[in-house]
Amino acid sequence: MAEAQNAAPAGWYPIADGSTQLRYWDGAAWTNQIHDPATPATIAAIVPRQPLRAPDGTSPNTLWVWLIALWPVLSLLSLVPTLFYLQGIADTDYTNSNAVIAAALSPAYFLIAAAGLVVYLVLALFSALDYRALTRAGVPQPFHWAWAFLSGWIYVIGRGVVVRRRTGRGLAPMWVFIALEIAIFAVSFVIAIIFTIEITSQLSRFAISQAGYSF
């Protein structure tokens, strides 16, 4: 060790004769870095970890991710009972308390709740199938499908970022999903404003009638 200290270039040198352990000499002094080549865990600790990459030519696209990307359009099916429900609320006779309760708890209300649950579960199922398809295609450690239980947004964006790192592409489904979600949100917002104005007008008429005035 004395000779190494005096003349050897930087590198790993045996701590003692017959020992498998090595200490790192930085060219000027011994460091505290010690490792044993016979211990795989030690070698793994000092060898830089290679980035996870899928085999060349691996496709990041699956049927399931495109169904998820187009899901905002499919979810419009739940908008139909919503429109019927809102129209029923707007047309309610607010002078009749029973009519108000009946409108609020109409079959359309429960249909909306059921449609929302179906959308939630099917989206999670498609995410799981997408995750399995990516794994079988050779994509290492894809974004886990269970994130879909929190939000379709989280899964689609997380999936896009991770698969981009693994394959070098795969962001198209994410952008399609985001564009459709924004467009549908804008349409839903306009519809909500229209029905809010109509319901507010109905409530105003009810309040005036209760005060003893009429149009």
Image (tube, rainbow, N blue to C red):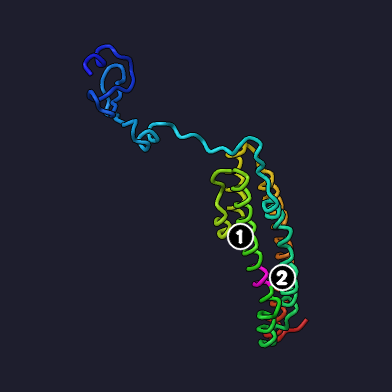
**In the visual, does 142 lie left or right of 169?**
left
Q: Position of residue 143 (x, y in %)?
A: 56, 49
Q: Residue at x 46, y 35 (%)?
A: 49
Q: Residue furthest front?
A: 18
**Cα–Cα span, label 2 and label 1:** 23 Å
* Camera-nearest residue between 202 and 78: 78
Image quadrant containing the N terminus: top left
Q: Earlier in the sequence, mark 2 or mark 1?
A: 2
Q: Position of residue 171 (x, y in %)?
A: 65, 43
Q: Residue furthest top?
A: 7
Labelled disc at residue 82 = 2
- Relative to residue 143, is residue 48 depicted above or below? above
- Relative to residue 180, is residue 198 depicted above or below? below
Residue range in magenta is 112-116
Q: Is residue 182 visible?
A: no
Q: Amino acid under label 2?
A: Thr
Q: Position of residue 39 (x, y in %)?
A: 34, 35
* Camera-nearest residue between 180 and 87: 180
**In the visual, does 166 lie left or right of 73?**
left
SS at mark 1 in the image: helix
Q: How many marks?
A: 2
Q: Residue at x 73, y 63 (%)?
A: 76
